[in-house]
Image (spheres, helix red, strand yellow):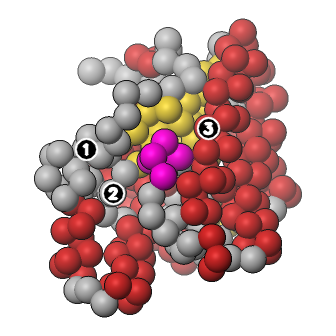
Amino acid sequence: MDLGLRGKVACVAAASSGLGKASALELAREGARVAICARHEGRLQQAAEEIARETGGEVLPLVADVTRAEDARRFVQAAVDRWGRLDILVTNAGGPPSGTFEDFDEEAWLQAWNLNFLSTVRLIYAALPHLKQAGSGRIITITSVSAKQVLPNLILSNAVRAGVHGLVKTLAQELGPHNITVNAVCPGPILTERLQSLLQRAVETQGITMEEAQRAWVSQIPLGRLGRPEEFGAVVAFLASERASFVNGALLQVDGGMIRGVM
C-alpha cells in the first residue's frame, strides 16, 4: 500500500530511541523527509545515522529539549529551513516518574505537566503556521493507554496525559476546517527503555524478579506478548498518511487489546 508520504516533511520529537525513533524510522521508510530531536547529541546522531542507513532517506537531527519553548521553535524551524515546508508533526516526550499520589510534591506535578502537556502545546504552536501554509497537515501526539485506563503507580501519567487527550479532541474540531487532522496514539506495553524502567521499578518496590514483572504486564494482553516498537511506528505512519485523511480526533491505542473499555 502506498501511503502517499514520499516527499512529505515530518518533525518527530524525542526520537533518539523508543517510540519516537520507531515512528521516525517508519516515516522515513515510506519516503518522508524526517527531522528528529532529542536532548543527548550522541544518541541522537546515532539514531539519525541508523534511520538514514536503513531507509536511504533524508534525516535532520537537532539537539533540543521540548520542555523549552525556544528549543521547540528551533526544531520545527530547522526542518522548514532545510526542506521549505512542514506536513507532519509527531509530538513526544519521555514519561514522568512512576509512583503514587503521596510520592510526589507540587514540583513533581509541575515537571510532569511541563514535560508531557506543555511540550505538546509548544510543538503545535511552532508547527501550526507552517501546516496552515501547506494547506493540510497531520498532528499526531504520542500519549499512553494510561490516559484511557488508569494504571497502578502511574498517577502523573494517568492525569497529565488525559489532559493531552482533551487538547487533541478540541484541536481536531478547531483545525479540521484547515484540513489538518489531530490524533493521539496510545501505546500499551511495548518493549522500549521506558517499559524496562517500569519493570525495574516493579522489581525494586515489589520484591519480584524481572521475569515476574514482565509476566504481570503480558497477563493483561489478549495477544499474550509485549508489543514491538516497529508495530507502533507503523500506526503513526498510517495516521500521517493520505490513507488516513478522514481520521480526525481519534485516540487510538496500540496495546494488543489490553484496554477493555468500549470508548
Circle 3 residues within 10 Å: few <14, some 14–19, many ≥20? many
Q: Position of residue 188 (x, y in %)?
A: 37, 51
Circle number at residue 183: none
- Cα–Cα span, label 3 and label 2: 19 Å
Q: Are marks 3 and 2 in contact (CB under 8 Å)?
A: no
Residue 19, horizontal then vertical, whole percent: 43, 55
Where is the N terminus found, in terms of image quarters? top left
Task: In the displayed orientation, state which residue is furthest to the left.
Answer: 224
Q: Which mark is residue 165?
A: 3
The residue positioned 74% from the left and 39% from the top of the image is: 124
* Among the two numbered marks 1 and 2 on one chain, the one whose residue lies closer to the N terminus: 2
**Element marked by disc 2:** loop
CA gap, disc 1 to disc 2? 8 Å
Q: How many marks?
A: 3
Contact, mark 1 vs mark 2 (Cβ under 8 Å): yes
The residue type indicated by label 2 comes to Pro
Q: Can residue 106 be seen in this snapshot?
A: yes
Task: From the image, tell me which residue sits under label 2.
Answer: 189
Whichever of labels 3 and 2 marks the residue nearer the N terminus, that label is 3
Q: Which of 204 and 66 lies nearest the eye of the viewer?
A: 204
Disc 1 or 3, which lies upstream in sequence?
A: 3
Question: Height in image: 230 above or below 219?
Answer: above
Residue matched to label 1: 256
What x and y, as percent, mark residue 130?
Answer: 76, 29
Using a 10 Å C-alpha cutoff, classify the residue at mark 2 as few (fewer than 14 neighbours), some (14 to 19) or many (20 or more): many
In the image, what residue type sits under mark 1?
Gly
The stretch of residues the image draws in magenta is 145-150
Q: Which residue is pictured at 19% across the width and 58% down the height?
A: 219
Establish if 31 lies above or below 59.
Answer: above
Q: Marks 1 and 3, how far apart in space? A: 20 Å
Please name the amino acid that badge 3 sits on: His
